[in-house]
Image (cartoon, rainbow, N blue to C red):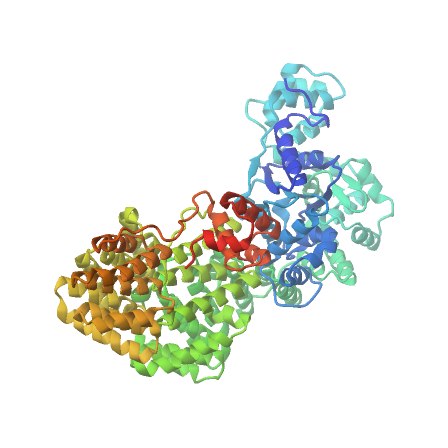
Amino acid sequence: MPPDNATGLLGRDQELRELEILIGNARNGRGGSTLLLGDPGIGKTMLLDTATARLTGVQLIRVDGYEAESTMPFAAAQRLIRPLRDHLPALPERHRQALLVAAGETDGPPPDRFLVGLGVLGLLGAAGDTVPVVCAIDDAHHLDAESLDVFAFVARRLEAESATLLLAGRDSPALTNQAAGIPARHLTGLPQDAAVRLLMRTLPERIDPAVAVQVFAATAGNPLALVDLAGELTVRQLTESSFGDEPLPVGRRLEQHYLRQVRKLGAEAQLWLLIAAADATGNLDLITAVAGDLGLPADVADTAETAGLVELGRSVLFRHPLVRGAAYNAAFGKDRRRVHRALSVRADELNLVEHAAWHAAKATLGTDEQVAQRLERVADLAAERGGFASRARVLMEAATLTPAGGVRYARLVRAAEAALAAGTSQLAKDLIDEIDEGLLDPVSRGRLTVIGADYAMFVAAPTLTRASADTLEAARHFHGHDTDLEQAALIKAWEWALSPERLTAGIEWPELGRRFAEGAALKEGDPAVILRAISALILKPYPDAVPAIRAALDLYERMDPASMLNYGHGVAALATAVWDAEARHRLLEKFAAAARDTGSLQKLDSALWVLSLSEALGGTPRQALKYMEQVRELRRAIGYDAEHVVNVATLAWSEAARPQVLAMAEATYAMGFGGVHSTAMAALATVDIAEGRYAEAYQKLKPFVDDPFFHVTPVTWPDFAEAAAHCGFTAEAFTTAAQLTELAAASGSRWARGVAHRVQAVVHGNEQDFLDAIADLDGAYAAIDEGRAHLAYGEWLRRAKRRRDARPHLRKAADLFERAGADPFTVRATRELEAAGETRQESVPGRPAQLTPQELTVAELAAAGRTNAEIGATIFLSVNTVDYHLRKVFQKLGISSRRQLSDRLDHV
């Protein structure tokens, strides 16, 4: 039998040791976290209490979840932040602002919960530089959704901070889903020996060990059940009882036990317990005031404490949440409503707006529009603080109190909007299904339609191919009622057509283009400029469309971050249409920066995905991989499995993965993501050309050229023309080369002009075209196309017996390909160089194999000139952790400064 630990806690030595290790690590500058999960009474709170009871030399912060605060955004996070306020000046301004807005202490743009998480992470890091911080968070299942997201985010990102987070809560799907990615420990009942010793230690008389074992089996070793249920019976009763072979339903039996304890008290004590249970936050001043309002004597609370049901101090603590449930459920409904009504009045006087509205709702029988309006105001306050999950839940409650009709369903529409904004897509879908669309006003009907389309895209539902058509229908609902919403819906209708591309259903492209032109004419402003550009791209001849597209790109250059968040998703299509890779990269980075600075990780995820896909269309595989690593880091930060997140087009550059890429491309096509499919096939065709499989490249590209999709198809023309020329389809090659030359002239793009010259050179064999291609592509932000121009010219020179002239171009091509991570072209260029009489040495150092992906990302960002704070914001780490990784990078690479990083890493 293992010995008891020094505290007297039985049967939890291993769990206690794990918590002590985490706390010890925090003392040594290594952050960590754990989530204790288990049934009521299993000992989660006792374990937290024991682990933190005698701590010295640390700052201990205790935070409990309360049901009454479960719809008050960042309520629990505020309690964690409050003791750390002295360290706020150490945070970046946007993180400090996010914490203050979330706490309701200042006005500002509503912060995303993950931006608040970054602020809390930085706060713990700064505080830990002074003294280690231990945060013990109990009843996590009762936390408001925003606080739980913040704590979970911080728990996943703690690395090099002198801080640890210890969370505990009931083992429920809601909690485990939201806390995914945090190391979890599932607590079960005590081992038999510890359970028997606990029972022996608790009872006033000795009990037969065999009966004690039977009690252990009946309670499944649940410590609270062993102490309280067994304590309710005499030793004789325990001995004579027949528990049976199956464990008792512990939770129900415990609550019945506490219910009996409550009912043993007098009416006044029961009413006081009901007030405390209804309040649920332990606010002793509020409870005392309401008790006085209801005529209770001042010393009535002492009776409840003497009975062992509560503990009085600065606040009221119930012996266990099941005691609170028993005290609440013991009362009649009319008494509960009377207590809530009194609590609402007093909370209103104390300016506790959220509490007052919550209690008013609990006091209402049936519907009450006035109370619903109070809840709607609370929902608006939640939105102002960035609490969209809380807003959704409060609006749902408001809807239940609203008389039947359009107003009720309009509130459910707004609740669904908030739910989707918070990432709780299933809740949004459930709300959508409850709404009677026929009772909605036109604007609410349009908003409902937009939500449905957004939901389809968010969860990749089969209806995503109709998302564009549905959003166009929403614009029709808005027409004549809200121009801003109408123009926003039209822009989104275009964005939702970009993912399915040719698979988009329910619309005719000319109709869509005309609708965009009509929408642009409704009201001048940023949306009008963008709509005119999209309309021109769809309807006008290319030379006539270019000025409108350029005007939109100029607008994006001038946009403030807030506007960029609203409209940045579509910038890649317009920049690609005019072959401006540099502007595309710059503006997408601006979009990503706006999302990052506001903590909008959903939009940041989208921006990084588009950046990675864009690099697959005219960029480099290496850059595409870097952005995908940032996507993985983001997914890890918010608790998603990131190990299998891939850009299919980037994977196409790996020869070993070709069968996998084809299978993945077909799978995405079947799901409706035509854009992912076409990008993957285009990348595979490029690799085919690199390896001389021209017929295969031609077969892959021919369907897309025959069925063009606006900005995307011309990007594939160069490969199609080259493949056609090598396969004997000279007429198609000549026609495509001529089209590309016309496009280059109209676009004014150096990239397009250089590629057009290269294609003309490949098709016609004109040396001047090779030279013009090289000149145009030099510094045009098109490394692979520049390398291909040198490669094509070098091959042409070698075949013309001008081997000496060929070598510099082949050498340059191999270097460009190697830096870009375009391995198939590197192999081809190296082979050609050797055929020209020169053996090539690797010109740049390869990826340092000893660096982890995260270390490599930190190193590359540092080499690019980013500060530690900027790097941390980019990959969601604290400054302490960034500094820790950089020290490891320096040690592994044998360098001592950031300046030396650029000499050791590849740059593109």
* Above-or-below relation of 370 to 1: below
Residue at the image point whose x is 20% and y is 56% from the top: 692
Image position of 760 (left or right of 41): left
Placement of 265 over or under 761, stated as above or below: above
Residue in front for this viewpoint, 222 or 504 = 504
> Residue 726: x and y, percent?
16, 62
- Side of 290 relative to 818 (left or right): right
Height in image: 501 above or below 165? below
Q: Position of residue 727 (x, y in %)?
A: 14, 62
Quadrant in which residue 744 is drawn: bottom left
* Residue lying farthest to the left in this orientation: 728
Residue at 37%, 55% in the rendered image: 647
Q: Judge whether residue 710 can be spotted in this image.
A: no
Identity of the residue furthest to the right in this view: 298
Q: Quadrant of the N terminus?
A: top right
Figure quadrant of the C terminus: bottom left
Front residue of this view, candidates 111 and 742: 742
